[in-house]
Image (cartoon, helix red, strand yellow):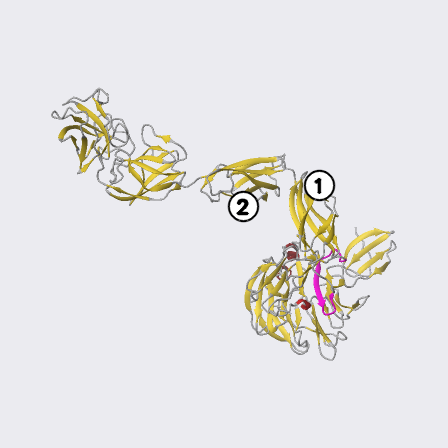
Amino acid sequence: SWNRVPTRTADFHAAAVAAGGLLLAGENGFEFVSTGGLARDISRLPATQILGLAIDPASRVWAGGPTGLYTLLALPESRVPGIGSVGRVAAGAGGSQSTTILTAGTTQVYESDDTGAQFSSRTVIPADELRAPYPPVIIDPVVPSSAYVAGRKVYHTSNSGAAWTALGTVDPDPTRVVIALAMAPAARTVLFAATACLPEVVLTSCPLTSVVWRSTNAGQTWVQMSVVDGFVNQFAIDPRQSTRVYAAIGAFPAGPSIPAGLSPGDLLLSTNAGAAWTSLLGNLPRISINTVVIDPASLPMQFTQPAQTLYAGTNSGVFVSFDAGTRWMDISAGLPASPVTNLAILQPDGILVAGTFGRGVYRTSITGLAPGLIVFPLSQDLTLMQGTTTNIGVGLNSLSMSTTIAWQLNSLDAWLSISQPNGNVRPLASSQVPVSVSARDLRPGTYTGRLQLTSAFGVQNVIVEAQVTPAAARMTITGGNNSSGLPGAALPPFQVLVVDENQPPLPAVPVTFTITAGGGSLSARTVLTGTSGTASAILTLPSNASDVQVIAATGTLGVTFTATVIVAPALLTDSIIDAVTFNANTSLGPGSILAISGQNLASTNAVASGSLPASLATTRVLLSTETGDVPLPLFAVSPAQIVALMPFNVSAGRYMLHCEVDSVRSNDVEISVAAFAPGIFTMSGVGHGPGLFIKDDGSIVTASNPAERGSSVNFYAAGLGAVDPPVDAGEPGASTEPLNRTMQAPRVFFDRYSASVVYSGLALGIAGRYQVTVQVPPFVSSSTNVSVSLTIGGFTSNRVT
C-alpha cells in the first residue's frame, strides 16, 4: 500500500533520502520532508525553465517560462505577480522613458506599457483557434505600441494591447500553427512566420517540417516561401537587409517539444527572403540550435554588407561567429550543462543574456570579445567496434592577425587520449591535433565524451559521441564481386555481411572499403552496417583498362573484391573486308567471309570448331536489319580481328554492323552487301597467287603434282549466295544427298576456257565455305600458271593460278 507524503508544493522531478528524511526537487525549488512528516523549504528557484528573454533599455532582463514572468535587474529575481505560464518575451522602448513589455501564455497575452509596473491581460486568440503552447510575440522596435501575437492567424495591436485586430490566416492547413514570428528591422511591414504541425497541439503524429511564410503588408496577407526540415524556433533578420534571414532549427518551437528535440538541429540562412536556404552549421555541434541573435553593433561600414557577428544558443551552450556564420567559437564557459533556449543582446552596453531550460538565466559581457581560436569541428560522431582503437582529428584555426595563440587540449574521459596536449598556432595558421578513441574497455553502447580546449580566448568544449558496436566474428561477401564495366562506369554495390560469433547480423559496425590496385573511386570509405548487418560501397571504375581490387575490412576481418574495366570495342573505318579476296573495294555477299579489324574486339583469342557459333569468347557480331539484329556465325576472334560469315539468306543492300564484347557494344560501321561476292581460296590466304585445288585422291595440286586435262578438281569458295536446301547459318553442309547446292550455277574459267561444273554448293561436312568441283578443260595450256576465275550472277571472283 502507498501513503501520501505531505509537501508544501508539487511538480517534483527527483527525490533522494538524506539525513533521515526525503529531499525533493521540482519546479518550485527544493523541499525537505522529515521522518515526522513535516515539510520545510530549503530554497526556491523560481526562474528555472526559461523560454523567452528580453532586455529593456534600463538593462532589466525579462525572462518568461512555465513558472511565470520574472524581471532580473539584480539578484534575487523578482516574479511578476498575476502572470501565469508564458513563453517568448518582447520589450520595446516607448516615450517618456517607459518600456513596453509583451509576453504570451497558452490563453492570455500580457502587456505593460509602463516598464512592467502594471500588466494587463487579454484573451486575444479565440479559445477555438489552435495555437502553439506558447504563441510567439513581437514588438515593433520603432513604434512599441504596435505588437503582434499569432495562433493560426496573426493578431495586431496598435495601442499597446488595448485592442487587438485579427489579420489574415497564415497557413490554410488546419493542423499547422505559427511557431515563430519576426519583423524585418529595415522594412517593418515585412514579417516572417513559420508554421508547423505540433504533436502536442493536434495530439497526433506530425511531419518534422516547418513552412516559411512572408508578408509584405504587415501581416494582412501571407505568401508561402519554402518548406524546411525540422521545427523553426526563431528567426533573426539582418538590420539592413530585409531579405537576409536566419532560422534556428531546434527543440523549442514556441515551447518544448519532444519530437523537435529528437530531430537534427540546424542553422539556416536565406538571402532571398526565405525562398531558398543554406546550412550554417559549419563547425557547430550537430545538435538543436534553439536561438540565434544578430549583434547590431557588428554592421560593417560598407552599407551593402550584412552584420558580421551572430550568437547561437544550442543544447550544448552558446557560440559566436564573427564572419556571418561561417566559423563558430564556443563561449559557453560558466554555463551549466543545460539547453540554451533563448538569447538577448543589449548594445552599446555589450550585454549578452542566455536563458536555459532548467538552470535559470545567465549574463556575460561581450565587450572586447574578438575572433580567436576556431575549433573544427566542435562535435564529432564516430562508430567503432568493441576492443578496437581509432583516431580522430581536432582542427585548430587561428583568426588572430598578429598573435601566436598557445593552447592546451585536455580529455575529460579516459577513453579519449591526446598524444600532443599543448602547442601553439601562429597568426592565421591552422593545425591538427590527433586524438585516440579507444573502445578496448568499453561495452557496446553509446558514449559521450568531452575534450576541453583552453587558450587566451577562453575554454571551448569538443563533444565526441562514440557508438561502440559488438565485436564482429565473420565477414562475407554478399554481392558485387567479380563485376565488370566500361571505364568510368559505376558498378553494382560491393556488399558484405558482418555477423557475431553466434551468427546474428551486427548493425552499426564500421566497414572500411579501400582500393588496393587498379584505381577508381568509391562512394564511401567507411560505411556502417545496417539492421541486416550489411554494408556496401559503389566502385566507379578508372578510365584505363585494368583489374581493380577493393578490400573491405572491420577490425581484424577483411575480404577482397575484384572488378574488371572493360574497354568498349571499337571498329575502325573501312575495317571490314572480304577475308578471301582481300579486296577492300568490292561489296560483300551472302556466304562471304568477313575480316573485321578494330580494337578490344575480344577478351582473348578463340577459334571455332565444327559448327560456327554466334558468340565466341563473349564476342558477337550483329547485322542490323529491318527485322532486328542478325548474329553472324564466327570463325575466330582476337582483340584486334574477328573472322565471321555473312549469313546465306541476307538480301542485297546497305547495312549497319557492330560487335559486342561482354554485352558492351561497339560503334556501328556501314557495309554494302551485293547479291554475290565470289571469292576463291588461295594457298597463301591473301587472295591472290596459287589457288587451293584438290584432286579426287585428296592431294593438293602443285607444280610437282599438276592436274591432268579432263580430270576433276575441287576448290573452296565464298560469297556464292543462297543454297538449296537451305541450312542454318554456321552449320556445315550436308555430307549426303540432298546436298546444299547453290541457287545459281557458277561458271569457272581456266584462262579463256570454260570448265564443266560438276558440283557447286556447301562443302561437304564443313561449315562456312563452298565447294566447287569442275573438270579441267581439255584444251587448257599445260603451263603451271593457268589463271582460274569464277563468275556467278554477273559477279566475278578474284583470279588465282
| Residue 72 at x, y percent in the picture | 78, 67
- Furthest toward the bottom, the residue is 96
Amino acid under disc 2: Ser
Amino acid under disc 1: Leu
Report whether residue 533 is seen.
no
**Which residues fall within the magenta stretch?**
334-351
Q: Which mark is residue 523?
A: 2
Q: Which mark is residue 442?
A: 1
Element under disc 1? loop
- The correct choice, above or below, for 117 with respect to 179 in the image is below
Q: Is residue 575 magenta?
A: no
Q: Residues within 10 Å of mark 2 (few under 14, many from 20)?
A: some
Which callout, 2 or 1, points to the residue nearer the camera?
Answer: 2
The C terminus, quarter of image: top left
Q: Is residue 345 magenta?
A: yes
- The correct choice, above or below, for 457 with respect to 775 in the image is below
Q: Which mark is residue 182?
A: none
| Residue 184 at x, y percent in the picture | 62, 70
- The correct choice, above or below, for 519 with respect to 243 in the image is above
Tell me, yes or no, whether the two marked residues, 2 and 1, touch with CB atoms within 8 Å.
no
Of residues 486 and 468, which is closer to you in this image? 486
| Residue 157 at x, y percent in the picture | 65, 76
Of residues 664 and 162, which is closer to you in this image? 664
Q: CA distance from mark 2 to mark 1?
A: 30 Å
